[in-house]
Image (spheres, grey):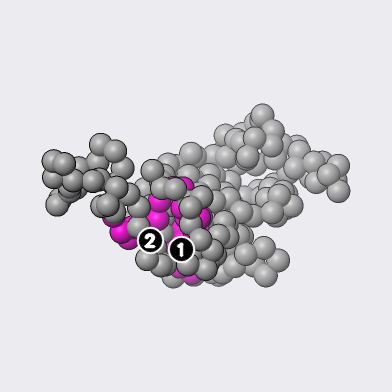
Amino acid sequence: MAQGFSQIPGIHYTEIFASMAHMVAMQTVMVIAAAEDMELESVNVSTAFLNGEIDTKLYMRIPEGLKVEGEPGPGEDLKRWVLQLLKGLYGIKQGPHIWALKLHLVLMAIGFKQIDSDHSVYVYQCDNTRIIMPIHVDNLLIASNSKEALSKVKTERATHFKIHDQGPTKLILSMCDKMWDEPSQVSDRGAGGTMLTKGRVSG
């Protein structure tokens, strides 16, 4: 497995930023979704870090049990052989950062923009269609005033990444057990009301 603890800053990696929307931003999106009766759904990107492009030369020892072409023969020291990583991998220091960069480029290419107050929140606006998307590493919360636009965004994501469509949002980072009663949309006394209350309590 990747031994990120052995990586040296400035040599093996530079940035370790992980895209994680602030809790206040997540709560604000919930309130907006409730107030404007927006659709709210969740998507998880499977093995997200493997989509990132390695930004420096990085090598790792051949994992035990992995067969590779040209591997050491009988009697040769396996520890003298290494693999060069071309894609991100769980366990390396820059894994979250290069994944965040990959997702950023894909979102920007289809018209999303980062908001100034939180670079892990993206917004798409075209005519009367609006989509708000806070990111928490590999989890995407998608709020939209158009179910058709929301479905289109999920379809677009699936052309770039392997995704798990979780459908209508019922839990966000385990903040509450049940967020609303209607399965397809947010109610004021559900998500918005609950999250607004939590926001006031926490400060």
Choose between 100 and 25: the one closer to the eye: 100
Question: Quadrant of residue 124 in the image?
Answer: bottom right
| The magenta stretch spans residue 107 | yes
Graded by Cα atoms within 10 Å as few (under 14), some (14 to 19) or many (20 or more), the crowding at tag 1 reads: some
Choose between 57 and 35: the one closer to the eye: 57
| The magenta stretch spans residue 178 | no
Name the side, left or right, on which 23 lies relative to 1. right
Question: Quadrant of residue 119 in the image?
Answer: bottom right
**Residue for point 54% across, 51% down:** 137
The spot of residue 187 in percent (x, y) is 69, 40
Per the image, the residue denoted by label 1 is 12
The spot of residue 171 in percent (x, y) is 61, 36
Name the side, left or right, on which 11 lies relative to 203. left
Range covered by the magenta-colored residues: 83-108
Residue type for callout 1 = His
Question: Quadrant of residue 176 in the image?
Answer: top right
Question: Does residue 176 sit above or below 86 in this rendering?
Answer: above
**Residue for point 55% across, 60% down:** 16
